[in-house]
Image (cartoon, grey):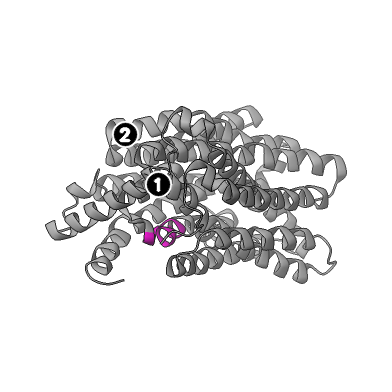
Amino acid sequence: MSAPADVVVGKIRRHIILPFVLLLIVSSLDRANLSFAALQMNAELGLSPSQYGLAVSAFFAGYLAFQFPSMYLLHRYGARRWIAGSVLMWGVFALGMMLVEGPTALYVLRCLLGLAEAGFAPGVVYLCSRWMPKRYRAAAIGMTMLAVPISVVFGGPFSGWLMSIQNPLGLSGWRWMFMAEGVLTIGFALFAWKIFVDSPAEARWLDEADKEWLRQQIARDDADTSAAGIGSGRGILRSGRVWAASGVWFALIAGAYAILYWLPQVARQFAASTPFEIGLISAVPWLGIGIGMAVNARHSDASGERFWHVLLPLLLCSVCLALATVPANGAVALVLLFVAGLGLGGAQSVFWTIPTGFLDKDAARHGITMINFCGNLGGLFGPYAIGVVRQSTGSFSVPIYAMALMLLAGALLLLWTRARAPRDGAPLSASTP
């Protein structure tokens, strides 16, 4: 970067992107801590694998149902109120998880938690496209996506530690964990209200020259994407590339949540006994995801290439995920899961540069929400399907093979998306200079 780009982009990273990362870490922790609570909660409440899988999927019922209304609220009330309100609401529901006494209450609270978080992830992607010029966008969006692996790498052991200690209220370990992490989230809602603004024009940390440079860059990007001719409304529904991108994101989300929600229980096969040990082992693939995100996104921005930076990591993840079921040695399987994580994180971090590269300003919020909506159907059906298959077969191998095939199908859809680009009016190049 050169001045003023290095100055302005650096300010945006500090004041917008990094706070987004913090909030997304909290979001991921509050939705994923169920996987660690299950180590104690399932036995205490008498939950079967299919009931646990349904509880995981219940989150996505609310999450998907409220995606479009949430994005409407973002545009109706502005980023500041929308962000702070969303964080406060999901903090309250996360705290309520400590009171669960049976499966029905668990399903309801998970659904409400999903409703509260609905739209936040696509909203962050959309706001990144409004704040960050296109040529720096992969690293910016990739940085926000680092929240998930960070929350597992550090949040997994943290959740396991909370469940293992003697708490002052004498609660079950999983209830104490939900309470502590819910209170933490409510505190972050106050943090969000204090630091966020609705648009670059209101940012006191940007001087007038910074704002003018940023306005020109975003306007130039908007003019470039308008040439793609996608439009909004029916144009989005008729676009083959939007539907194909939805399928690719479905595969990536399904793979991520399969690892997220079931790995702690798979970790028991690696001779881990305590929640803390299981949390450490579960963090290894997510360390790979985080490294893949950071390295691949920066390399993609530096080279300007997008397509191969998604396709090759996607194929790597598919192959290594399938191979991880073969070794009898747990350490070898863990290494393969780590490499699969590198591929999954690398593909996720660059993926959004492709749809935001062909969706113009008016189409972006609808197109991003639609892609995220369809993609997160993978979170709705994937974990539940794994629970049902595991209960019927007693093995994790069959659902893992299915996940690997789904990621391979995502790679084929990505190839089709590139071939389709000229018909939709986009340039032949898969790069975003």
Q: Please, is residue 105 above or below residue 351 in the view?
A: above
Callout 1 amino acid: Val
Q: Is residue 373 visible?
A: yes
Q: Element type at marker 2?
A: helix
Q: Is residue 170 visible?
A: no
Mark found first going from the N terminus, 1 or 2:
2
Our reading of the magenta stretch's main secondary structure is: helix
Q: Position of residue 186 (x, y in %)?
A: 37, 44
Residue designated by label 1: 124
Q: Position of residue 219 (x, y in %)?
A: 27, 49
Query: Dots 1 and 2: beta carbons under 8 Å?
Result: no
Residue designated by label 2: 75
Q: Residues within 10 Å of mark 2 (few under 14, many from 20)?
A: few
Q: Residue at x 51, y 50 (%)?
A: 29
Q: Position of residue 106 (x, y in %)?
A: 60, 33
Q: Please, is residue 37 above or below residue 302 in the view?
A: above
